[in-house]
Amino acid sequence: MRSLWYVVCVVVAGSLMTGIGCKSDADRACLDQFTTSQATVLEVKAEDLASVDGSVAAIASALRACEAAGRGGEVDELTQAHKQLSAHKDRLVRRAEMLAQRTELAPGELEKLVSTGDPKCPRGQGYLHGKSGKRIRCVGPQPIDMSSEQAEQYFKGRGYKLSRGASPLELRFEYGAELLVFSYSEPLRAGPPRCVVLYPSPDMSWQEATARLTGVSPARLSPGRPIAGAARPLALKVEESAQKVSAHIGDCSG
């Protein structure tokens, strides 16, 4: 984490130093704000939400100052840094929300989860119980195999915004720039979705986003080939353009 932000800061610092012989008040404000954000980012603790949040705020402040100064190069660099660090912050928030839901347990429930696993999170994953420190493995279905009710609980528990789709058979889950569209084949939506179309956030590859839904390693994913290792046969089609990337999983023909 630190090496990435060190490179970002050095690049931005170099561009800021260009032509500093004659600086306006706005230029100086941009440089001052950058210097502050650079110091904050270089000391960021990657797994500490408060530390990451402070770095995001520092970059945002520098970005506003450099936008006001009309310094396009600095704005581009700071925008990229802000996007990447904000995405990391979102991941920390979502992880904290998941752990918080499992911290308070009724007597006996913890022992049951430790021995049999947690059916509310996808198999292959796991987490530490906040108070006891005991590890709990996940034994539930992958998101791609969840019913409508299961998918709603799972994604809402991770901070996604739920909205209804174009028909009663469709659900949409949004988190920042990420969008997942689940389409079911029958009104009760009790079975797994017929098709899922995912639009990953800019900082995430379609392979990683697809792996999170299916539990299949990104290295085993290939556009145009069925997803090997999933609980059921799943077609995979990837559409890429300069503006967006989308992955279509399952029977998305209709």
Image (cartoon, rainbow, N blue to C red):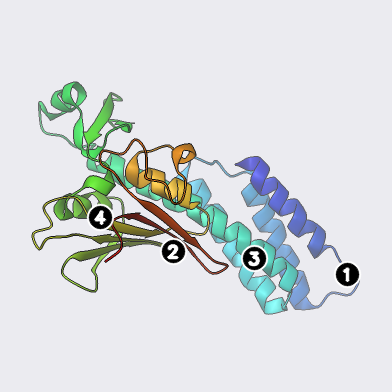
Amino acid at circle 4: Lys
Q: Between disc 3 and disc 2, whose residue precedes?
A: 3
Amino acid at circle 2: Ala
Residue 200 visible within the image: no
Graded by Cα atoms within 10 Å as few (under 14), some (14 to 19) or many (20 or more), the crowding at tag 4 reads: some
Numbered circle sitting on residue 62: 3
Q: Nearer the viewer, residue 156 or 195?
A: 195
Distance between the Cα atoms at labels 4 and 1? 49 Å
Q: Nearer the viewer, residue 176 or 166?
A: 166
Residue at position x 77%, y 57% from top?
Answer: 13
Q: Where does residue 38 sit, x and y in percent of width and height?
A: 68, 53
Location of the N terminus (image quadrant) = top right
Numbered circle sitting on residue 196: none
Graded by Cα atoms within 10 Å as few (under 14), some (14 to 19) or many (20 or more), the crowding at tag 2 reads: few
Q: Between disc 4 and disc 1, whose residue precedes?
A: 1
Q: Quadrant of residue 253?
A: bottom left
Residue at position x 37%, y 43% from top?
Answer: 227
Numbered circle sitting on residue 156: 4
Q: Between disc 1 and disc 2, whose residue precedes?
A: 1
